[in-house]
Amino acid sequence: MTDNIGMYYFYNGELKDSTIVQMPVLKGNKAVYEVIRLIEGVPLFLKDHYERLQGSISNIGYKIDFSFEVLADQIKKTSEANCNLNCNVKIMVILTEAGRQTLLYISKSFYPDEELIEKGVNVGLLQLERENPNIKLINLTYREAADKKIREGNYFEVLLCSSDGSITEGSKSNVFLVKENRIFTAPGANVLKGITRKYVMEACKSAGYEVLETNIAVSRLKEMDGLFLSGTSIKVLPVTGVEELCFKSAKNPVIQAIRKEYDKIIKKYIDEYVNIW
């Protein structure tokens, strides 16, 4: 896979050395995946990722064929073999009528630095909908359309819009909009239910803010005080531009408070599991 950055990877349950055995190019009818972030060797929210992977596989008519414990063990061994305790690990399950193949490796990642967080990012808008948003399925046509828009506009990300003009999610993130002390995000049925999204919603509530899952029209963007993206690598990232619209999201006290609460959730999780891993 082109996004592999590690020397060692797992293929069908066996640890391989990429300098000896080239990583296979997996081809099949359907491929589901998860990207899990490791901090200090601890895979964040691993149980949530496993359960979502299990759900994605089930929703396309298959059953997962490895346990949570097996996944945890392979992640640990991959991290240790590559001497990398702070990285993203991707697991892919390719499903075909002839069988299945499983690949686990350290993938390329981008972690925003403090300068970018304080500056915020610019995003574009793209009318595009996932065929089934609750399945984390590799879709090259979808990815190519989003990447094309990102390149053309020099955007960090694009926000997807439904046919009725509602903002749903980012192409590889979830999006939250802020108006005074209320937080808006698209209903879970309409988006990929990001693992980070789940814990960001907890962070919002811990910070004392109401979260409303509702459709927000693109035309209402100008009414918002700010907005931010959430994702495995980016955590909580302020958006300061949506095409021609500008926002002071990076300085918004609500977004800053949510970022701090989310970081507390991560720290608590790491403190709880660091000695186990």
Image: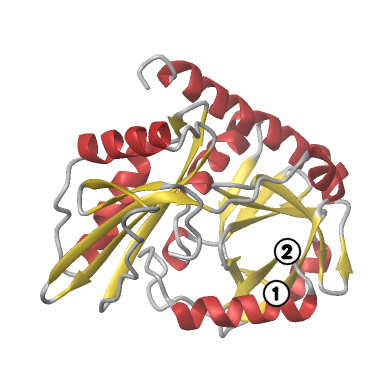
71 versus 130 height, above or below? above
46 versus 241 height, above or below? above
Q: Quadrant of the C terminus?
A: top left
Q: Residue 67's spot in the image, x, y percent?
A: 18, 41
- The residue shown at (56%, 62%) is 172
Residue 117, disc: none
- The residue shown at (22%, 47%) is 14
At mark 1, the secondary structure is helix
Residue 127: name its quadrant. bottom right
Q: Amino acid at mark 2?
A: Phe
Q: Quadrant of the N terminus?
A: bottom left
Q: Are marks 2 and 1 in contact (CB under 8 Å)?
A: yes
Residue 213: name its quadrant. bottom right
128 versus 2 height, above or below? below
Taking 160 as reference, is 45 left or right? left
Ranked by sequence position, the earlier of labels 2 and 1 is 1
Q: Amino acid at mark 1?
A: Ile
Taking 204 as reference, is 78 left or right? left
Q: Residue 174's spot in the image, x, y percent?
A: 58, 57
Disc 1: which residue: 150
Which residue lies most toward the front here?
20
Q: Residue 235's spot in the image, x, y percent?
A: 62, 43
Q: Residue 151's spot in the image, x, y percent?
A: 72, 77
- The residue shown at (33%, 51%) is 52
